[in-house]
Image (tube, rainbow, N blue to C red):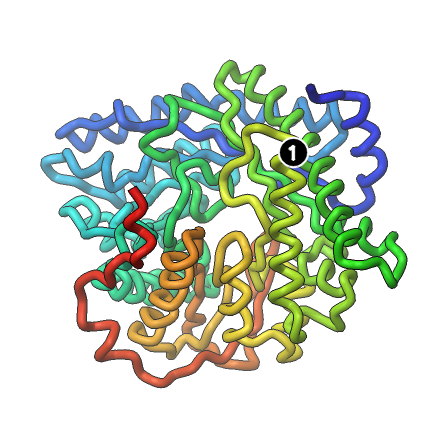
């Protein structure tokens, strides 16, 4: 049972350390919007989104005032659009993208996700058309986000789709080069994507989800850092882990309280709480700062992967004790551009691309919001994606790649977005060619442990 007095005490204790509800994301199924007529599809999508989400931002604002805790983002996630447009006689995915963007603006949300496809075993006609439309769709919209699942631990890695997505990322960056490649920043490639993720750019409403549900993403790297800094310098690992667990417990109960209250007001089911530590560029709200509080000189030092592994595990253990409905990704994110400490580490050369890849084996997602030279070839990007998909496939975990080839920029330059997306230095990549390997096509088979029925 959630004790509201305890939650309010917790909020009062930690409000100086950037605790927030990072996102409330309404998942809306669009399966009943399917029609052979593209006009009818777009009308159905717009009408359904605006019907269900019309009060989302208003009610979220009321709860912010009632409980004095900020809700940073209000978002919508919909059924993967490749499935919705596929039945049209003359599918126009860019038009659907614009409809989604317009519906999101109409109800006032920050982002709308689900311009997505699930292609781990192969591409249908609808999947192929959606992927080919992604660059233009992201260039012509403001709040739309896109994701494509390329691999799973059960199916293996679709290498045809990996190469296609590498080319798509390049084109998305090119079409938005005047905005530092923002199109690529709203596009993510997944292995083992999840149906109930409330975080962008990877949120979508999975096929097993209800008609509508509210998923909540909490955050609080600053809270965790403050709790660790309050410990004696000689505190051992067990005390460190327990402190993180207890802090994650408080963060999770706070998030679930707000999520359930909002779901009740909206008269929809509460879905899950994703207790990922999602950083921001704000001072003190950094996962990299947690590493320093643990005793590392800076993110990127030897020991960073071990520290991240412990952090991720302790956050999950604390969260699962606080709620029976933990879902999404849940753990710790390591986006470069969105974390002030990671930006500093990458700028100073403490944090390399290879170290980031190693860290993805134990974090919640993967190579996230990393800027690379605009001249990087599609083959090299495909190799980067394939490596990350392999880490997820073998380890039975979600991994992802959100990478921005900054057109006209090179190592030493930066990209700038502002807000939660922050800024990032252009990081060097290994340009040895994987061309023959990534262009072989077909599917890398699933590992032996996939045969577990």
Relative horizontal placement of residue 417, taking residue 134 as reference (left or right):
right
The quadrant in which residue 59 appears is: top right
Q: Residue furthest bottom?
A: 432
The front one of 209 and 447 is 447
- Helix, strand or loop at disc 1? helix
Kindly tell me whether residue 46 is visible in this rendering.
yes
Of the 4 image quadrants, the one containing the N terminus is top right
Residue 219 position by quadrant:
top right
Instruction: Measuring from the top left, give residue 184's x and y in whole percent.
Output: 41, 60
Q: Quadrant of the C terminus?
A: top left
Q: Position of residue 255 (x, y in %)?
A: 65, 32
Residue at image location 60% in from the left, 74% down from the top: 351
Question: In the figure, 412 relative to 221: above or below?
Answer: below
Seen at 15% across and 29% down, the residue is 37
Residue 118 against residue 21 in the figure, above or below: below
Given residues 325 and 75, the one toward you in this image is 325
Please determine whether, in this image, residue 231 is positioned above or below residue 247.
below
Residue farthest to the left, as pictured: 89
Q: Residue at x 73, y 61 (%)?
A: 289
Q: Nearer the viewer, residue 239 or 202?
A: 239
**Picture residue at 34% right of the left edge, 72% below the top:** 383
Q: Is residue 285 above or below residue 177?
A: above
> Residue 273 vs residue 286: left or right?
left
Q: Which residue is mark 1?
A: 321
Counting from the top left corner in percent of width and height, residue 411 is at 52, 81
Circle 1 crowding by C-alpha within 10 Å: few under 14, some 14–19, many from 20: some
Question: Which residue of the protein is positioned furthest toward the right in this rendering?
Answer: 232
Return the x and y of residue 308 as percentages of the image width and height. 63, 60
Is residue 72 at least partly visible in the picture? no
61, 127: nearer the viewer: 127
């Amino acid at each position: 049972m959630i004790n509201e007095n305890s939650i309010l005490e917790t909020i009062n204790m930690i409000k100086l350390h950037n605790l927030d509800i990072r996102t409330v994301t309404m998942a809306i199924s669009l399966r009943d919007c399917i029609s052979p007529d593209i006009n009818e599809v777009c009308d159905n999508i717009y009408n359904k989104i605006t019907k269900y989400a019309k009060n989302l931002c208003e009610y979220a604002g009321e709860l912010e005032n009632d409980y004095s805790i900020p809700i940073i983002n209000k978002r919508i996630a919909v059924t993967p659009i490749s499935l919705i447009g596929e039945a049209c006689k003359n599918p126009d995915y860019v038009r659907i993208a614009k409809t989604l963007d317009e519906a999101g603006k109409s109800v006032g949300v920050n982002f709308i996700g689900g311009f997505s496809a699930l292609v781990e075993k192969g591409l249908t006609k609808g999947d192929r058309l959606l992927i080919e439309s992604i660059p233009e769709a992201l260039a012509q919209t403001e709040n739309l986000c896109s994701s494509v699942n390329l691999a799973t631990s059960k199916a293996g890695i679709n290498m045809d789709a990996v190469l296609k997505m590498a080319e798509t990322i390049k084109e998305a960056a090119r079409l938005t080069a005047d905005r530092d490649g923002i199109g690529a920043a709203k596009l993510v490639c997944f292995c083992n994507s999840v149906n109930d993720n409330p975080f962008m750019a990877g949120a979508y409403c999975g096929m097993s989800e209800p008609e509508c549900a509210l998923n909540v993403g909490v955050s609080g790297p600053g809270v965790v850092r403050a709790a660790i800094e309050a410990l004696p310098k000689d505190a051992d690992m067990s005390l460190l882990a327990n402190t993180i667990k207890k802090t994650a417990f408080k963060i999770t109960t706070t998030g679930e309280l707000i999520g359930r209250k909002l779901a009740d007001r909206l008269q929809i089911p509460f879905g899950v709480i994703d207790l990922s530590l999602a950083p921001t560029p704000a001072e003190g709200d950094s996962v990299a700062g947690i590493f320093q509080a643990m005793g590392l000189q800076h993110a990127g030092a030897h020991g960073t992967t071990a520290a991240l592994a412990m952090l991720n595990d302790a956050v999950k253990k604390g969260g699962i004790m606080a709620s029976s409905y933990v879902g999404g990704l849940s753990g710790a994110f390591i986006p470069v551009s969105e974390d002030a400490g990671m930006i500093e580490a990458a700028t100073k050369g403490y944090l390399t691309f290879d170290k980031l890849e190693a860290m993805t084996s134990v974090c919640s997602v993967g190579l996230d919001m990393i800027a690379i030279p605009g001249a990087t070839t599609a083959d090299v990007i495909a190799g980067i994606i394939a490596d990350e998909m392999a880490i997820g496939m073998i380890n039975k975990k979600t991994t992802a790649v959100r990478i921005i080839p900054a057109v006209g920029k090179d190592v030493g330059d930066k990209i700038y977005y502002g807000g939660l997306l922050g800024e990032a230095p252009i990081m060097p990549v290994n340009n040895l060619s994987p061309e023959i390997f990534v262009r072989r096509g077909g599917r890398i088979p699933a590992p032996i442990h996939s045969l577990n029925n």
